[in-house]
């Protein structure tokens, strides 16, 4: 005989819901990690940037360029002499205006500015390529480290690789 005061059996659907929720909570906890720290970006001040820029080489001083222009030598010849001497000039805007007022052709001034700009960009490209190589080497080192960790023996009771070293 069944007594009238017996507790009713819990519904099967609520028990399934409870088990599914517990399994989901355990699964999601395994995915919860601390977020990766973003890489720190190195910032340079204007003084540091100026120090890193290649120093101008003036085998053919600006005074000689002005003298050549005053002698009536053409812009092409002055540019050829600047290239042959290997000179590079870092000119401020005020200095460019002064040189133009002293009779240096605009083509020569354009060449001086564009040659220095090209030189700076080339040096920046070399530096960027060097940093890229360092980054790729570091990525490869970390990838090989993770490959080695993945090949560690597993416990029959724990389905994840055992990290033997802290």
Image: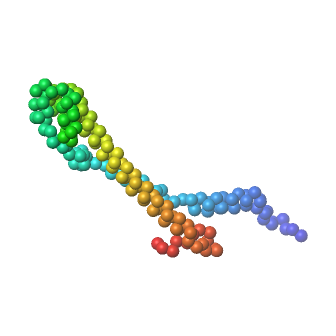
The reply, left or right, for residue 138 in relation to residue 63 is: right
Establish if 138 lies above or below 95: below
> Considering only vertical position in the picture, is 16 above or below 104?
below
Tell me residue 156's x, y (percent): 64, 74
Closer to the camera, 72 or 52? 72
Colour pattern? rainbow
Relative depth, front residue between 30 and 117: 117
- At x 15%, y 27%, the residue is 73
Task: Report if residue 87 is visible in the image.
Answer: no
Image coordinates of residue 60 in percent, x first then y, are 15, 39
* Rendered position, 34 above or below 153: above
- Decide if residue 134 is on the left or right side of residue 13: left
Q: Nearer the viewer, residue 142 or 126?
A: 126
Screen quadrant of the N terminus: bottom right
Q: How many marks?
A: 0
Residue visible at 20% across and 27% down? 75
Q: Is residue 82 visible?
A: yes
Q: Which image quadrant is residue 79 in?
A: top left
Residue 67 appears at what percent x and percent y?
10, 31
Looking at this rendering, what residue extends furthest in the right direction? 1
Residue 57 % position (x, y): 18, 43
Which residue is found at the position 48% from the left and 73% from the top? 165
Q: Quadrant of residue 30?
A: bottom right
Q: Is residue 59 left or right of residue 43?
A: left
**Residue closest to the eye, 137 or 158:** 137
């Amino acid at each position: 005989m069944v007594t009238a005061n017996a507790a009713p059996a819990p519904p099967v659907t609520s028990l399934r819901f409870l088990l599914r929720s517990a399994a989901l909570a355990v699964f999601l906890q395994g995915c919860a990690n601390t977020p990766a720290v973003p890489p720190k970006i190195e910032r340079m001040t204007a003084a540091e940037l100026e120090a890193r820029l290649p120093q101008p080489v003036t085998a053919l001083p600006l005074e000689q360029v002005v003298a050549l222009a005053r002698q009536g030598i053409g812009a092409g010849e002055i540019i050829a002499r600047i290239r042959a001497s290997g000179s590079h000039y870092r000119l401020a805007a005020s200095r460019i205006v002064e040189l133009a007022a002293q009779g240096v052709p605009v083509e020569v001034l354009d060449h001086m500015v564009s040659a220095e700009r090209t030189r700076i960009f080339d040096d920046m490209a070399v530096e960027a390529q060097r940093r890229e190589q360092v980054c790729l080497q570091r990525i490869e080192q970390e990838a090989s480290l993770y490959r080695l960790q993945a090949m560690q023996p597993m416990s029959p009771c724990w389905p994840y690789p055992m990290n033997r070293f802290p």
